[in-house]
Image: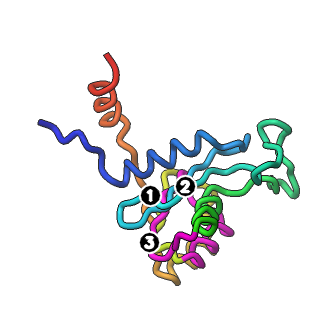
Amino acid sequence: MKDRRIPWNQYFMLQSILLSLRSTCERLSVGAILVRDRRIIAGGYNGSVSGDVHCIDEGCYLVDGHCVRTIHAEMNAVLQCAKFGMTTAKSEIYVTDFPCLQCTKMLLQAGIKKIYYLRNYHNNTYAMKLLKLKNVEIEQVKVDKEYLNSIAADTYFD
């Protein structure tokens, strides 16, 4: 019998994709999961500060071509750990899109040891240099859609 369990990397990346569906950003929906010892410790998606209006309701608040209303998914995940007293040291992050420079710096300061990402997104050369300097591994995760479809079809659909 074929092993019906998906690989860990795909499992966590799918969790990130699922979180991205909660995004309130009109420009790009991003999700992120922080993982330590194969356990999810926090998650986040890009959106407004709690209680503020959302971009999907009033449009993006653009300054110099960037939405200043939105908090990035990676930052929301790290902030969730700070809010609830969870250490981020030696954890890994699964994020739907390669982190921007500011998020990369924040992840380095938070002690993240590895970044898994699904899609390339404006991969900054200085961010890459910092990741190499700090010996933080990066790995692009490929989601095997056909395998996942076959499992889902066999398990959930007629």
Q: Which residues are magenta?
A: 85-110
Query: Left or right of 55: which side holds 145?
Result: left
Q: Position of residue 99 (x, y in %)?
A: 60, 62
Q: Position of residue 105 (x, y in %)?
A: 63, 74
Residue labelled with disc 3: 137
Residue drawn at the location 34% of the way across and 30% of the way down? 149
Q: Earlier in the sequence, mark 1 or mark 3?
A: 1
Q: Residues within 10 Å of mark 2 (few under 14, many from 20)?
A: many
Q: Quadrant of residue 74?
A: bottom right
Residue labelled with disc 2: 43
- Looking at this rendering, what residue extends furthest in the bottom direction? 133
Q: Residues within 10 Å of mark 1 (few under 14, many from 20)?
A: some
Q: Amino acid at mark 2?
A: Gly
In magenta stretch: residue 105: yes
* Above or below: residue 27 compared with residue 74: above
Split into 4 quadrants, where in the image is the N terminus? top left
> Which element type, helix, strand or loop, lies under badge 2?
strand
What is the C-alpha distance between the residues marked 2 and 3? 20 Å
> Which element type, helix, strand or loop, lies under badge 1?
strand
> Which element type, helix, strand or loop, lies under badge 3?
strand
